Amino acid sequence: MADVSVTLLDRGRVRADRNYVVDGHAMASASNPDPDHELEEFVVWSAVVETPETTYLWDTGSHPDAGDGYWPAPLYDAFEHVDAGDHDLEADLADAGFVLSDVDAVVMSHLHLDHAGGLYHFDGTDVPVYVHEEELKFAYYSAKTTEGSIAYLASDFDRDLNWEVVHRHRHTLAPGFELYHLPGHTPGVLGAHLDTDEGPLLIAGDECYVDANYVEEVPLGPGLLWSERDWFESLETVKELERRSDASVLYGHDLERFDALAERWG
């Protein structure tokens, strides 16, 4: 087995309507014209992946000033990261026994504001920041024009960063650490398959926010879905990887699943 270890980092809670995350969760009908909506807590997380040669940081979480005007008001109203100020990257790394200088490279699953908000820590450094080609293109397109998605903030990633662009559908970072292109939520979502001493771990990331997206195959809500067709194809990729390796699957924001896996990879 490859010598890979994973430490999951809890980066706080976002409160949002479950309808954003599970398409059609609360739909009005003739018999139920005013359905109840569920305001749910979703986890934001990062991970430290240690290999014999390199220590990687997976995602950087939200900017600590998300609730103090850094995030646009309409976005924060819909996706309230209630404790972002309590989850500075350096502090959360320290709680897990790491310091920022331990990070040799960063892997960005994608560049939405709840994942890229800590990239400023690597501004002006030579730390490689891995991102898929399609994600980097779409992030700049979205942040610099009126097209694309409003979930990208140029201030998160339009910096002096040492980008390492992933071009293919599969990329080996280290023995036992494979990246997979999983478009759907955005054009360039990256997931990963990791062979660890605690068993195989499959990071689906925001391909699946919660268990219902994966088990019941209910797509994300339209506001969180760039391409439904690509999303379904990526879902099949993740399920095939799970079947091959019997891996535990980690979703992008499912609090219950995160807590369960953090007991094993924490």
Image (spheres, rainbow, N blue to C red):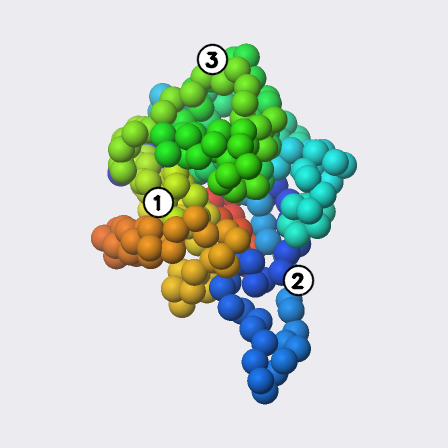
Amino acid carrying mark 3 in the image: Asp
Total residue callouts: 3
Look at the numbered discs 1 and 3 and tell me whether their residues touch, using CB distance below 8 Å.
no
User: Could you tell me which residue is drawn at 70 percent across and 34 percent down?
Assistant: 70
Q: Quadrant of residue 174?
A: top left
User: Could you tell me which residue is drawn at 43 percent across and 30 percent down?
Assistant: 136
Neighbourhood count class around disc 1 (C-alpha, 10 Å): few under 14, some 14–19, many 20 upward: many
Q: Is residue 69 left or right of residue 10?
A: right
Ranked by sequence position, the earlier of labels 1 and 2 is: 2
The residue under label 3 is 126
- Distance between mark 1 and mark 3 Cα atoms: 27 Å
Q: Position of residue 67 (x, y in %)?
A: 73, 40
User: Could you tell me which residue is drawn at 56 percent across and 63 percent down?
Assistant: 19
The residue under label 1 is 182
Q: Is residue 148 left or right of residue 34?
A: left
Ranked by sequence position, the earlier of labels 1 and 3 is: 3
- Distance between mark 2 and mark 3 Cα atoms: 41 Å
Q: Is residue 135 above or below residue 79?
A: above
Ranked by sequence position, the earlier of labels 2 and 3 is: 2
Q: Quadrant of residue 85?
A: top right
Q: Position of residue 110 (x, y in %)?
A: 46, 37
- Distance between mark 1 and mark 2 Cα atoms: 27 Å
Q: Position of residue 66 (x, y in %)?
A: 69, 37
- Work out which residue is located at the far right of the displayed protein and give it: 68
